[in-house]
Amino acid sequence: MTTEATLPSTSASPTARQVWTRARGIALAVVLLLAAAVVIATIRSDARHGTLDPRSVDPKGSRAVAELLADRGVDTRVVTTLDEARAAAAADTTLLVAAPDLLTHRQQSWLRSATADSGGRTVLVAPGSWSVERLVPGVTADPATSLDSELSPDCALPAAQRAGTADLGGVRYTTTHLDADECYPSERLATLLRVPEATDNGDSIVLGAPDILSNEHLDEQGNASLALQLLGSRPHLVWYLPSLSDTSAADADDERSFFDLLPSGWLWGTLQLFIAAALAALWRARRLGPLVPENLPVAIRASETVEGRARLYRKANARDRAAAALRSTTRTRIAPLVGVTVSQAHAPEALLPALSAHLHNHGDGQSLHTLLFGPPPSDDTALIALADQLDALEREVRRP
């Protein structure tokens, strides 16, 4: 026989209302965060519409430089697939790759094989370490980007000498080619490279930033002069805008993962959010270890303590806990009065026979068992009745 009455824990479990009350702050924060992310993504998508597109008149577009090249007899053609870009590589053509980092490694290798011996010029706009080493072997992107924007040529490249100061900066590069032109250095690393190819007159241009090609910066510094000289050295300009819908990307077996496509700023921002959440959790967490007893600054009446605990039980709808506390206290107090030790006060087989004998069989054994070890009351009225019955039982036991 068990020595302790089994009490259901349903009333101690949080209700749906309590769960919502506790979680609504977190839910509101998540909703606000998602809404802010959508707004920022929308703003950024609008701002980047037509970026480096020679047909776009947006501030980030490149319609202005295409018009200036047309006035000088250079025709510009836009392509969006790798097959078109490879087919266009020729000695009388400049091939501009607007976003080299969007290409998979296999696409980069295919593009390099088409341009290496074409005798034309290849212009890469802000390639990172993902693409520059395959598209221009011997060139490496430095992980730290330049914060400078207005830089001086500081090289012997005629186009750079004539253009003078220009808005470059961005990605910085190093090269093992001894005959390369390293221009517009930022902290001793070049932000514009011209690397000659083995074929006569063929070369590759690496730009650290796209500013000299954008509509909003073309009329600043020597940007227009530098852009026209770099893109207008041949009668044909093929402007390659890599597209995610290109079928050649689907055939590649070395595609980047989702995290490779995310800008580094988003990864750092997510890490900072996790750190902030962890610090907030530590700040709001309950203290560890056992509670330390402390003397109260003022004396509190016992009735106020009882009333306060009763209100907590009622707020939590914990009638089972309240009933268990009442019955346990009553058993502990009456056990010594009927000759039962406190250690056996919660064992029905020890307490009930002694209690019945003490009451001279005036109490029914079954009713005493229900009163002292029975199930929890179903409502507050039953709980009050239980408390009154326990109080009456204790008075009867104490009666001489």
Image (tube, rainbow, N blue to C red):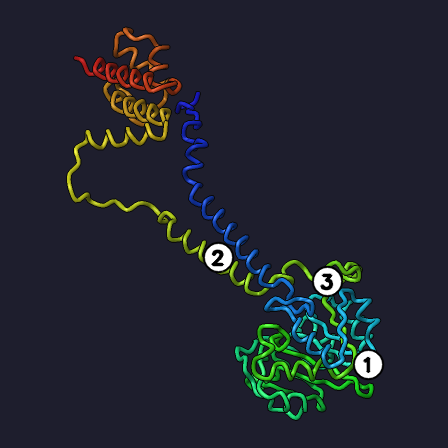
Q: Secondary structure at mark 1?
A: loop
Q: Nearer the viewer, residue 229 or 300?
A: 229
- First in residue order: circle 3 vs circle 2: 3
Q: Quadrant of residue 77?
A: bottom right
Q: CA distance from mark 2 to mark 1?
A: 52 Å
Q: Secondary structure at mark 2?
A: helix
- Nearest-to-viewer mark from 1 and 3: 1
Q: Write down the quadrant of residue 342 in the picture.
A: top left
What percent of the width, then of the height, locates residue 193? 67, 84
In the image, 320: left or right of 35? left
- The residue identified by callout 2 is 273
**Three-letter code, disc 2:** Leu
Residue 194 in the image, given as x and y percentages of width and height: 70, 85
User: What residue is disc 3 on?
Assistant: 243
Q: CA distance from mark 1 to mark 3?
A: 25 Å
Label 3, residues with CA under 10 Å away: few <14, some 14-19, many ≥20: some
Up/down of 129 relative to 308, above or below = below
Q: Secondary structure at mark 3?
A: loop
Q: Which mark is residue 92?
A: 1
Mark toward the start of the polypeptide (1 vs 3): 1
Dot 2 alpha-carbon crowd within 10 angstroms: few under 14, some 14 to 19, many 20 or more: few
Q: Quadrant of the N terminus?
A: top left
* Circle 2 or circle 1, nearest the eye: 1
Q: Residue at x 42, y 24 (%)?
A: 6
- As drawn, 149 above or below 52: below
Q: Which mark sits nearer the N-terminus, 2 or 1?
A: 1
In the figure, residue 250 lies in which quadrant?
bottom right
Residue 105 screen position, x and y as percent: 74, 68
Label 3 sits on what residue type? Answer: Ser
Label 1, residues with CA under 10 Å away: few <14, some 14-19, many ≥20: some
> In whole angstroms, how far apart are the C-alphas of marks 3 and 2?
32 Å
Q: Is residue 49 left or right of residue 11?
A: right
